[in-house]
Amino acid sequence: MGKPKLKEHIINREWCKGCGICVHFCPKNVLELDENDKAVAVIPEECICCRLCELRCPDLAIEVITEPSEVSESSEVSETSEV
Amino acid sequence: MAIKDYIRERFFPHMWCAGCGHGIVLNGLLRAIEQIGISKNDIVMVSGIGCSSRISGYVDFHTLHTLHGRALAFATGVKMSRPELKLIVPMGDGDALAIGGNHFIHAARRNIDMTAIVMNNRIYGMTGGQYSPLSGYGTSATTAPYSNIDHTFDVVNLSVAAGASFVARTTAYHVMQMISVLKQAILHKGFSVVEILTQCPTYFGRKNKLGGAVEMMEYFKNNTTSVGSKAKQENPELIERGVFVRKEIPEYCSEYEKIIQRATIG
Amino acid sequence: MSQNIRFIQGNEVCVEAALYAGLNFFAGYPITPSTEIAEHLSLRLPQIKGRFIQMEDEIASVCAIIGASLTGHKVMTATSGPGFSLMQEGLGYAIMAEIPCVIINVQRGGPSTGLPTSVSQGDVGQALWGTHGDHAVIAMTASNHQDIFAMTVHAFNMAETYRTPVILLFDEVTGHMRERLVIPEPGEFPLVERLRTSVKEGVDYHPYLPREDGRLPMSDFGGKHRYNVTGLAHDMWGFPSNNPSVVQGLLRHLVDKINNNSHNITRYNEYEMEDARTVLISYGSSARSALHVVKNRRARGERIGLLELQTLWPFPFGLVRQKCADAKYIVVVEMNMGQILQPVRMAVDNPERVYLANRIDGVFITPTDIKNILRIIQGRGM
Ligand SMILES: Cc1ncc(C[n+]2csc(CCOP(=O)(O)OP(=O)(O)O)c2C)c(N)n1
Ligand code: SF4
Ligand code: SF4
Ligand code: SF4
């Protein structure tokens, strides 16, 4: 299975409540809260597509889109990344 | 299907506070269901009353938002009358174990096939931060201004003692484990309990000076360990996570089918 | 024609009638004097592939039948006073969420644990106002086995027609006495089946949008429409709403669908009423004694009649006013402190002519009791 490559982070600014969970727990510090307290990807090139931001968002506001082909959702992430 | 296909998008953004762990439970549950691939028409979600119980309004299943504490009793009627349906019953800790404690132990005892999810934030969120049976000795709440003297339940031990045939615990931090145990619980034939420690930053966090959502999730990360781990032996204070019980015992609706067979022969 | 005649208890009659009406699911908790209903159904329901469950309490029982009704089944629970008290929150839920179900209360003496094995009609008021908030309920009763059968079938029909809980208020005497029952042939009583929506899959379905006639076509849980059911005030999709006009519309609908159809819901019997100067108004087992008095005194030439109410709520105000128009004495015979006396006084043109003949001591009111009271009332004159 090839490593997924990031296409983009889709962040729904209407739904994001700025809790900062995705920002704090991103292993690569890809995300930040902007001046409106909405999550944004500031260094997307660092993203390892672990999807933890997507899975931990309480507001279903962030989606990690990978290419070329969508890998089977989240099952890619190793259990160790969260123990 | 994408997880967006399982929600009622028009009601988003949802009503929960920023950083509320209940949203993470919703997130994990949707992924578990998506990964199992159950048809939306085959799922009935029954919830009680509380912040947690509002989850049923956001999912595109057959949804029954009931009375405080009574979700499992309603769910029992749904399940028994249409055993082929998948029943998912999310409840708050007060909902499941204070006012609904009796229904909880009896549903477990019957081993009726449904998944009870206890969204344990250790507080009454909806009514504004009163102590729950899960708050614990020494905690602070709007009804425990001098410190709480109530002792807590261990939801896992209680469920095991009551006879649940699948019992697991995880937290809002451990999302991969959450998805995994929810999948196992939903697929398990019998009464399954998944306790998920979730953060209520608005009340439990604030009242107990635990910081915001991020700090409360750090706490889950640092103060829990896998069930049976060495870490637990070294530090008994750690809360264990994982699957505690999984056993195949006769399921209630299947047993009733046998009763019907017996009754219709004679 | 070979008639199916049985000599059984009233509680068993209720079971036979419920099965005749299509009962498929029962949840209950044992309590005297209703327990025989649960016992018989635990035997009978699995024989017809129906389901019986003994729950952990009456709260769970009423909740379970609501759940089972939502999957498209005819459902019932049975209890007595203390259990009926525990059911009140669930009853309100069924009213608010418009879930058809039948709740039997075989009344005993109260309040509290009261007189478990003695007769009373003390829960009549509770049936109407036991659950909180503005609402309307249907509550019915009967005084003999043939009528217990008919009213039980009627209760299921009304529950389905108006999508509402229907309460049957039997009592210890009718529940436990044995008398003859001719079991009606299939088809003898019309049965109302659940009105299901014709809206196709994928088309926007409004589970809480009443038709012109006030009825709501349902979709079974597990079926093609996924919707929300809640006890919160809700919109036509079943989603919570606190929009004042939505809330107002919902509450009006809940009350109007019952009160405006009183003519369809009301059942009663009348005996010797044409020229009656003394009108006894009674219901349930006390109507048996009242009827005895009427027959007895008619034989001696007294112009006395009995109006036996079978539908108690919504109260048949028009009927009572009309039937009592020419009466000099209106005597309500009941085994409580006047729970039907009050609405009768509100109904009639001359409330000062309304009297109460009652017993509240757990002892069945006899014809002699009624006669003794009548003697005092009539002796006093007007
Ligand atoms: C019979 C009844 N009693 C009390 C309430 C008020 N009430 C609503 S939610 C709630 C507690 C909520 O706490 P919990 O179940 O832990 O869920 P949370 O809101 O924390 O998610 C209470 C006491 C009610 N709705 N019904
Ligand atoms: S976790 Fe979700 S809601 Fe919170 S900041 Fe990130 S995107 Fe926004
Ligand atoms: S997918 Fe992982 S690495 Fe990428 S932004 Fe999200 S949490 Fe950070
Ligand atoms: S009050 Fe607490 S439980 Fe309720 S939504 Fe807010 S954070 Fe969540």
Image (cartoon, coloured by chain):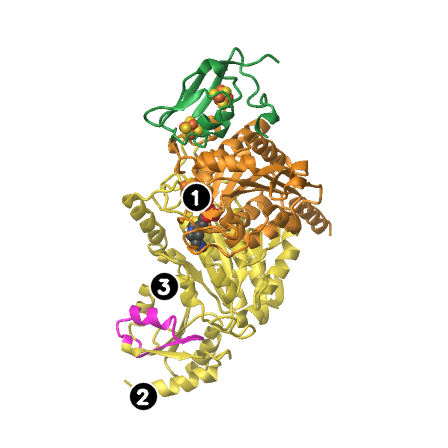
Residue at (38, 87) in percent of width and height: C375
- Spatial CA distance of label 1 from label 3 is 57 Å
Secondary structure beneath disc 1? loop
Q: Pick the quarter of the image with the C terminus of chain C.
A: bottom left
Expressed as whole percent of the image width and height from the top left, the position of residue B89 reads: 54, 42
Q: Is residue B14 visible?
A: yes
Q: Quadrant of ligand 4?
A: top left
Horizontal relation, residue B185 to residue B30: left or right = right
Q: Which mark is residue B209?
A: 1
Secondary structure beneath disc 2? helix
Q: Which residues are magenta?
A: C327-351
Residue at (48, 74) in percent of width and height: C288
- Spatial CA distance of label 3 from label 2 is 29 Å
Tell me which chain appears yellow.
Answer: C
Secondary structure beneath disc 3? loop
Dot 2 corresponds to which residue?
C380
Horizontal relation, residue C260 to residue B9: left or right = left
Tell me which chain appears orange.
Answer: B
